[in-house]
Image (cartoon, rainbow, N blue to C red):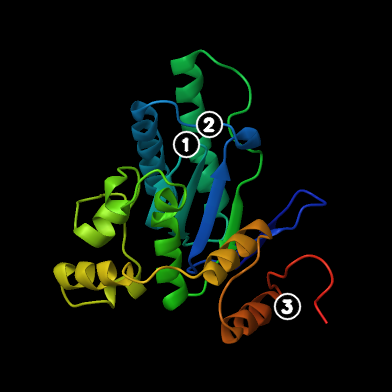
């Protein structure tokens, strides 16, 4: 079993996967085209996701299914489990789509994106970033009105057998009710534009996101300094 692994197709930036660390994953439709066409498709994807989670042992903490992309917040037990997870989901869901709509060709972009995530506040911010996606894209005005995300489970207590809460979420309270109330309270404060930009940059560049201590920890484990940086020359 690998302690960590890099997966890359040159000249793309290699993905960094570490066991027992949370990761933010995004998979988009090919050329940003739709990957869901009807309500039944969202249910089929969740079925495929559940089967893949059971097969790989990856723990799912948050998710949202949008019309042309998917966000997942997960923790693997082994570094290679994330690639196995995405392959298993893709294989089953693409077969469903091709059969249902009698189509051929590529459904997903060839390469999912991932960002290694610091725990604590960064993890809860990432959950909010994911679950607020339908609000940012004007699909709904309240995240609870969107059925294809983990928000209703994490904030409102709706049963969702796919989810395994992260320790950072569990630390919000001693009971499910107190945790949900504390988590719901977080949504009273909007994510800053800077925070949103940080998550987007990290996932685009396949880089970890966290405080300086976390980045030094990852550097110690991997022997490489990994940090998301805006492209272009720094401002003087």
Is any part of residue 157 visible from this angle?
A: yes
Residue positioned most to the bottom: 213
Residue located 51% across and 32% down the image: 35
When the figure is inspected, residue 142 is found, relative to residue 91, above or below; the finding is below
Q: Position of residue 120 (x, y in %)?
A: 42, 78
Q: How many numbered tags mark residues here?
A: 3
Q: Nearer the viewer, mark 3 or mark 1?
A: 1
Q: Quadrant of the C terminus?
A: bottom right
Q: CA distance from mark 1 to mark 2?
A: 5 Å
User: Which of 39/108 is in front?
Assistant: 39
Is the residue marked by circle 1 packed among few (<14), some (14-19), or many (20+) residues within 10 Å? some
Q: Which residue is mark 2?
A: 34
Q: Position of residue 178 (x, y in %)?
A: 17, 73
Is the residue marked by circle 2 packed among few (<14), some (14-19), or many (20+) residues within 10 Å? some
Q: CA distance from mark 3 to mark 1?
A: 38 Å
What element does badge 3 sit on? loop
Kindly indicate the quadrant of the structure image that contains residue 125.
bottom left
Which of the marked residues, 2 or 3, is nearer the chain's N terminus?
2
Are discs 1 and 2 less than 8 Å apart at CB? yes
Q: Position of residue 153 (x, y in %)?
A: 25, 55
Are discs 3 and 1 less than 8 Å apart at CB? no
Q: Which residue is mark 1?
A: 67
User: Which of 199/103 is in front?
Assistant: 199
| 197 sits left or right of 232 in the view | left
| Mark number displayed over residue 223 | 3
Q: Nearer the viewer, mark 2 or mark 3?
A: 2
What element does badge 2 sit on? loop
Are discs 2 and 3 less than 8 Å apart at CB? no
When the figure is inspected, residue 32 is found, relative to residue 100, above or below; the finding is below
When the figure is inspected, residue 178 is found, relative to residue 88, above or below; the finding is below
| Mark number displayed over residue 77 | none
């Amino acid at each position: 079993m690998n302690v960590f692994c890099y997966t890359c197709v040159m000249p793309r930036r290699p993905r960094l996967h570490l066991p027992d660390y949370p990761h933010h994953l995004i998979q988009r439709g090919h050329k940003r085209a739709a990957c869901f066409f009807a309500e039944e498709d969202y249910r089929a994807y969740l079925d495929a996701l559940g089967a893949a989670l059971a097969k790989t042992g990856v723990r799912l903490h948050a998710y949202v299914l949008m019309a042309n992309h998917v966000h997942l917040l997960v923790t693997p037990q082994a570094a290679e489990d994330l690639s196995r997870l995405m392959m298993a989901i893709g294989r089953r869901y693409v077969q469903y789509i091709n059969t249902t709509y009698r189509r051929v060709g590529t459904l997903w972009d060839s390469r999912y994106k991932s960002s290694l995530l610091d725990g604590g506040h960064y993890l809860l911010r990432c959950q909010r970033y994911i679950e607020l996606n339908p609000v940012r894209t004007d699909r709904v005005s309240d995240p609870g009105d969107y059925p294809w995300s983990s928000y209703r489970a994490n904030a409102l207590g709706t049963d969702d057998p796919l989810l395994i809460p992260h320790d950072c979420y569990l630390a919000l309270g001693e009971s499910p009710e107190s945790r949900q109330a504390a988590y719901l309270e977080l949504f009273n404060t909007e994510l800053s534009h800077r925070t949103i930009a940080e998550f987007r940059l990290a996932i685009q560049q396949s880089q970890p996101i966290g405080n300086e201590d976390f980045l030094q920890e990852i550097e110690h484990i991997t022997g490489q300094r990994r940090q998301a940086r805006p492209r272009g020359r720094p401002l003087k």
